[in-house]
């Protein structure tokens, strides 16, 4: 039996911890501003009308929505780095010893890891929504709920990798590679129509594509979406469930204190 | 009453190395059981298996009615642990750590507010409650770790070297807290490599070495049980030879001789008043001038030496 109170207690701890990494938060915010105010604006001017129409009429809006998804992704995977920080200080052992089940621990961490990212990216998201101009609030609300699930799934993914690899250096390198591939092989930054066909196949099953589609759909950029919203939601539910299950499995069957590099 | 902790052939291997080797030990409800042994004896590994932080390779342990392998979540509801190395993140403050710990242990907001304050005052960290533990000394960090079990008041409190790096006044304070915890109904499993701590605090002492349990009993009974109940410590002007040492061991009623240094011996014997003149005569014959003679009661170190042939210090160096 899972206690929601305990799940929330674990999640709350992760949220609180994240807000203390002030340097990281400031740097990520600067990165976001430069992506929008420099890269987005300049690249938007470079695109021909046919490209602009392929992304719903305005590449800047398409790009700004995609950047929000990459921000959500990159700040959510930070939970994996937290696990290494905790392993260095023995806090993993402490967390494994408290009266919380492994299921509650993994769920709490996934929710905490996702929610804190949502809270952090929230103001930037509002800014982008303001720039795009939202037309349907209900649609936006549905998209945001799905994006919550998306971040929980990304957190579960990061937790699963962290506890499987047990080496912060390898994790860091792997996350760098995954970040490069998962972002670039998705529709977060450019439309699928301009990708070589092998890339299109990968992009069409990439969770970041579904998340970006949903956000654009919620923001009223329906024409830029690749798949129907229901399919995107379903894919995100599968993504979340899969990595939550892996995370729980690893915590219950494999994870022990000690042995971290 | 059935034991509150029962270890049955509890074993943990890390690759080829056996950290805990078929440990069979029972802990009675309401007692303080001292787990005594040098570093590397397997004490911490045993405690980590009981708290379900690591999994046994073989055998199991029952915490209350729960098998740690089968029902780890339930086992953890009975246990609270203060780790040997404080488990704290640099961004944390004692207030945050204890408040979260109290919350995860199920204390209400009202209870937390009172108890966290009370515990922080008890461990003399109230004035530093909002500072980052990053700036804390080893002793202060240790007090935060101990505070966790004081706030939790678990049915079984597991404390791993609770007074390491703590000054003598602090040690007495923590010992009293642990005694109070026991008097309020908690069972305490205390891992230590400090002989005096095990002696003064434990109702029973289990001595471990190289992952194995050597003996477990009340400290007094352990000390009384070793043959050669009298201990004579002799310091010599010069080093003793191997041949002379062998002869010394042959003196009737001399049970064992431990060489602390080549000119410093610890002799375990029976009926010291009769044997001591023979020993001094022996040294005179061997032209070994005696610098000092001191008689003492056997300690837990002597019990350890009886079973292993080493003092705890020597075993630690090994």
Image (tube, coloured by chain):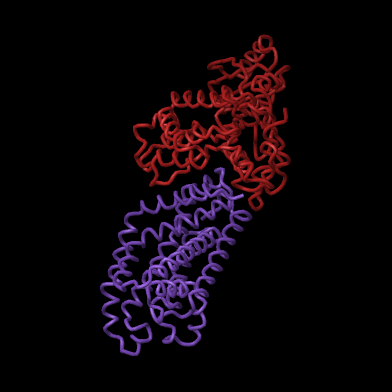
* Closer-to-camera residue (B179/B296): B179
Number of numbered markers: 0
Work out whether A228 lies above or below B150.
below
The residue located at (48%, 79%) in the rendering is: A227
Quadrant the C terminus of chain B occupies? top right
The quarter of the displayed image where residue B79 is located: top right
Residue A257 is situated, as x and y percent measured from the top left of the image, at 56, 49
* Closer-to-camera residue (B124/A117): A117
Work out whether B223 lies above or below A20.
above
Residue A11 is situated, as x and y percent measured from the top left of the image, at 47, 52
The quarter of the displayed image where residue B144 is located: top left
Who's purple, chain-wise?
A: A
Who's red, chain-wise?
A: B
Work out whether A142 lies above or below B185.
below
Left or right of B153 in this view: B305: right
Residue B301 is situated, as x and y percent measured from the top left of the image, at 61, 26
The quarter of the displayed image where residue B315 is located: top right
The residue located at (51%, 70%) in the rendering is: A233
Residue A21 is situated, as x and y percent measured from the top left of the image, at 36, 54
Left or right of B26 in this view: A116: left
Work out whether B108 lies above or below B182.
below
Quadrant the N terminus of chain B occupies? top right
The residue located at (37%, 69%) in the rendering is: A68
């Amino acid at each position: 039996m899972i206690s929601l109170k305990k799940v929330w207690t674990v999640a709350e701890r992760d949220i609180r911890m994240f807000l203390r990494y002030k340097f990281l938060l400031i740097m990520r915010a600067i990165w976001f501003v430069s992506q929008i105010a420099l890269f987005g604006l300049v690249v938007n001017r470079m695109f021909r009308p046919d490209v602009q129409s392929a992304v719903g009429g305005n590449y800047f809006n398409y790009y700004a929505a995609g950047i929000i998804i990459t921000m959500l992704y990159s700040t959510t995977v930070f939970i994996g780095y937290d696990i290494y920080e905790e392993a260095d200080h023995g806090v993993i052992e402490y967390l494994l010893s408290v009266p919380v089940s492994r299921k509650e621990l993994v769920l709490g961490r996934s929710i905490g890891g996702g929610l804190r990212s949502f809270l952090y990216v929230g103001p930037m998201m509002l800014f982008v929504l303001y720039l795009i101009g939202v037309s349907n609030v209900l649609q936006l609300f549905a998209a945001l709920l799905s994006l919550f699930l998306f971040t929980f799934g990304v957190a579960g993914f990061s937790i699963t990798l962290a506890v499987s690899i047990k080496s912060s250096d390898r994790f860091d390198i792997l996350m760098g590679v995954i970040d490069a591939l998962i972002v670039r092989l998705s529709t977060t930054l450019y439309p699928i129509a301009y990708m070589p066909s092998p890339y299109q196949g990968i992009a069409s099953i990439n969770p970041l594509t579904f998340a970006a589609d949903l956000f654009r759909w919620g923001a009223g950029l329906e024409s830029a979406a690749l798949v129907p919203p229901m399919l995107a939601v379903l894919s995100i539910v599968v993504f979340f469930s899969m990595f939550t299950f892996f995370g729980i499995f690893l915590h219950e069957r494999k994870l022990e204190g000690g042995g971290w590099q | 009453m059935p034991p509150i902790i029962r270890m049955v052939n509890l074993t943990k291997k890390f690759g080829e190395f056996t950290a805990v080797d078929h440990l069979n030990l029972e802990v009675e409800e309401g007692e303080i059981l001292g787990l005594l042994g040098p570093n590397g004896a397997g004490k911490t590994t045993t405690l980590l298996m009981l708290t379900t932080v690591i999994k046994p390779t073989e055998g199991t342990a029952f915490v209350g009615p729960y098998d740690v392998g089968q029902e780890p979540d339930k086992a953890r509801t009975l246990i609270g642990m203060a780790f040997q190395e404080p488990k704290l993140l640099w961004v944390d403050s004692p207030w945050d750590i204890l408040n979260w710990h109290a919350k995860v242990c199920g204390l209400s907001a009202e209870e937390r507010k009172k108890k966290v304050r009370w515990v922080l005052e008890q461990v003399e960290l109230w004035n530093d409650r909002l500072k980052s533990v990053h700036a804390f000394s080893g002793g202060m960090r240790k007090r935060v770790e101990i505070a966790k079990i004081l706030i939790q008041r678990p049915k079984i409190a597991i404390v791993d070297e609770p007074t390491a790096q703590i000054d003598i006044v602090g040690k007495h304070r923590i010992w009293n807290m642990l005694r109070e915890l026991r008097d309020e109904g908690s069972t305490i499993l205390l891992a230590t490599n400090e002989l005096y701590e095990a002696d003064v605090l434990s109702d029973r002492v289990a001595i471990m070495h190289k992952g194995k349990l050597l003996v477990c009993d009340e400290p007094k009974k352990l000390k009384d049980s070793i043959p050669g109940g009298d201990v004579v410590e002799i310091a010599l002007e010069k080093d003793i030879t191997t041949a002379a040492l062998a002869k010394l061991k042959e003196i009737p009623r001399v049970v064992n001789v431990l060489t602390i240094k080549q000119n410093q011996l610890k002799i375990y014997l029976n009926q010291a008043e009769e044997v001591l003149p023979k020993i001094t005569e022996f040294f005179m014959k061997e032209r070994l001038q005696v610098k000092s003679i001191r008689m003492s009661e056997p300690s837990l170190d002597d019990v350890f030496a009886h079973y292993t042939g080493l003092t705890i210090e020597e075993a630690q160096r090994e």
